[in-house]
Image (cartoon, rainbow, N blue to C red):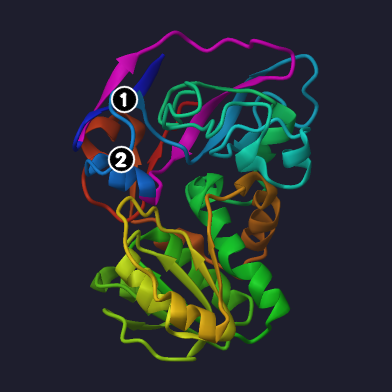
Amino acid sequence: MRELTYVARRTVEWREAPDPKLDSDAEAIVAPVAATPCDVDSAILAGHGFVDPPFALGHECVARVVDVGDTVTTVAPGDLVVVPWSINCGTCDRCRAGLTAHCATVPYMAMYGAPIGGTWGGLFSDLVRVPYADAMLVPLPAGLDPVAMASASDNWSLAWRLVAPHLESRPGARVLVVARGSIGLYVCDIARALGASDVLYVDPDPDHRTIARGYGADTTESLDPLPQGFDIAVEATGRVDQLALTVKCLTPEGICESAGNHFRPGELPLLDMYLTGITLRIARDNVRAHIPSALTLAASGKVAPEKVVSHVIDWEDLPTALPEKHLKPVFVRSEV
């Protein structure tokens, strides 16, 4: 089989690898049918990653099950499934507590798309081995388009977690979204669908702002702090200066969720945050715990994640098209 391999800045190529085999009765082999780059993949391709190449890339996809071990009960060959980005067993204390990105059974940071917790391959591969298949794989609900839901492995389900639980406890909240890619746009869609009274989307890209307005958000290209203007804020830029501006906009006891990958250090207005009494969460997502709820919302018809898909591109064009700067391209295979 082939796996798409990141080899240098803006450069990926197909490399041959052995077909994956079932190593236990609890595993599955899947074939991605709709895969898309995460926002962090864009940073890696731009040369801002934290692991030296070469390595297999990709950690967001909907796949078709090809084979399963004898003890797998939740999926069968032919099923369409969402493959979570992090490797998790589902049975350790952390997994049972919903902390699937911190599974105690596998090495720290075990994941697809980067070899920092073992080598698990990437989801831009012709075939992928999935350990702990019953715990990891989530069947795609009937009627959902794999292209629209290619990001459910990470960004779509992360966006649900960033805003949905907070709106449940704070109905009608005002939401600020400071972003540079797909996560922020998904948040706009979900926030409006779940009853946010106002959504302000901040992004210098005019095309992104157009999509956000289609979700009912107000938009602006830069953020001027609005003290005590918002109950919930989501920062997804990866820039500490933008996070600092974001937290200054919160109401007393407001909540800020940071989904940016902050590769560079910076300073936050800690005294302002203390006086306002805000809650700031910066965390990689325990996405497996949220995928079912995020898919349920997607299936409700209240949201339109397909609007964020910027391009639908043939699987064979991955090496040339992936390094190009697109918002959210989805690479599809029709023969699986």
Q: Position of residue 314 (x, y in %)?
A: 33, 36
When the figure is inspected, residue 245 is found, relative to residue 317, above or below; the finding is below
Would you name the residue on which mark 1 appears?
Answer: 5
Range drawn in magenta: 11-39
The image quarter containing residue 80 is: top right
Give the distance between the C-alpha atoms of the residues marked 1 and 2, in whole angstroms.
14 Å
Determine whether, in the image, residue 224 is placed left or right of residue 129.
left
Front residue (pair 7, 275): 275
Front residue (pair 334, 283): 283
Quarter of the rendering occupied by the N terminus:
top left
When the figure is inspected, residue 25 is found, relative to residue 39, above or below; the finding is above
Is residue 216 visible from the viewing direction of this image? no
Camera-side mark, 1 or 2: 2
Q: Which mark is residue 49?
A: 2
The image quarter containing residue 195 is: bottom right
Front residue (pair 232, 307): 232
What's the residue type where badge 1 is placed?
Thr
Q: Residue at 47% x, 47% y: name it.
A: 147
When the figure is inspected, residue 183 is found, relative to residue 256, above or below; the finding is above
The image quarter containing residue 106 is: top right
Q: Position of residue 127 (x, y in %)?
A: 49, 21
Q: Position of residue 8 (x, y in %)?
A: 20, 30
When the figure is inspected, residue 176 is found, relative to residue 334, above or below; the finding is below
Task: Determine if the magenta segment contains residue 22.
Answer: yes
Q: Residue at 64% x, 87% y: name it.
A: 172
